[in-house]
Structure formats: structure tokens, C-alpha cells
Amino acid sequence: QVQLVESGGGLVQAGGSLRLSCAASGRTFSNYAMAWFRQAPGKEREFVAAISRSGGTTYYADSVKGRFTISRDSAKNTVYLQMNSLKPDDTAVYYCAADISILPKVDKAAYDYWGQGAQVTVSS
């Protein structure tokens, strides 16, 4: 089992920045590819960003490319999502997820473990 706990959500004005953190416990953090997904009210959960076990490979959704950055710190068992130039369309609950694969995937069905979510609200 892997336990994931997100933090860092909140309310921010359009154009602002937030950094989400996801602390992992329970198993060896470096054995897991990690990802962030988000779900807006009335919409499907969608892929945002993912990072490989080593941190050397990252993937981003087109909608966030150039604005968001995913990173991981193995010493702290934590994955981050730095979000800049936020837009009202980025408003959603953001979820951290873990997958035993070496390389990250964009399909939410591939992920075995999920956090409880962190609300991000961007006002216009």
C-alpha cells in the first residue's frame, strides 16, 4: 500500500501561482511513477502531468504545458506540481497518483494509488 496526501491548494487570482505537494508513505517512493490529475465539477478526471521513477521523464497535458512543472524529491518522498499563470479553467480538485511502472502513463486507469485531492480555485 502507498498512502498519498496532497497539500498546497487554495484560492488564487488569475495569473497567480500555487505549488501543490504530495507526500508519499508506505512503500519505497522511488519505485513509483507519479502523476497529477484534476477533476472539475461535472467533468471527467483528466491527466495533468506525470514523472518517471527517476524524474528524468515528464509528460504534460497540452493545456498546462509551459505553465506547470512536475518534480519529485526522493529524499522527502514528495512530488510537486508548480502551477504558474493560472487561469479560471484550472479550477478543479487536483489528485496525486502513483503507479508501479518505470515510465509514467497518462491513463488514469493505470494508477493504483490516489490521494484525497486538493481544491484549487482560480478567480477571474
Image: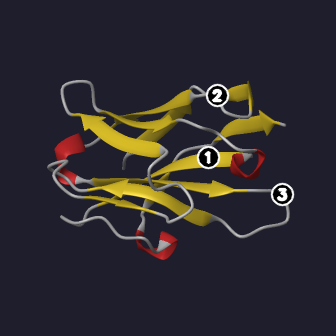
Query: How far is mark 3 from mark 2, CA to CA?
Result: 21 Å
Query: How far is mark 2 from mark 1, CA to CA?
Result: 17 Å
How many labels, in total? Answer: 3
Up-down: is 107 above or below 10?
Answer: below
**How many neighbours does mark 1 have within 10 angstroms: few (below 14), some (14-19), or many (20 or more)?**
many
- Circle 1 sits in a helix, a strand or a loop, which is it? strand
For mark 3, what is the residue?
41
Amino acid type at image mark 2: Gly
Q: Position of residue 82 (x, y in %)?
A: 46, 35
**How many neighbours does mark 3 have within 10 angstroms: few (below 14), some (14-19), or many (20 or more)?**
few
For mark 2, what is the residue?
16
On the rendered structure, is 54 left or right of 90?
A: left
Residue depicted at 36% across the width and 50% down the height: 1
Residue depicted at 16% across the width and 52% down the height: 56
Q: Position of residue 24 (x, y in %)?
A: 37, 36
Q: Viewer-nearest of labels 3 and 2? A: 2
Q: Quadrant of residue 3?
A: top left
Q: Which residue is more in the foreground, 40 or 14?
A: 14
Amino acid type at image mark 1: Tyr
Q: Position of residue 28 (x, y in %)?
A: 20, 42
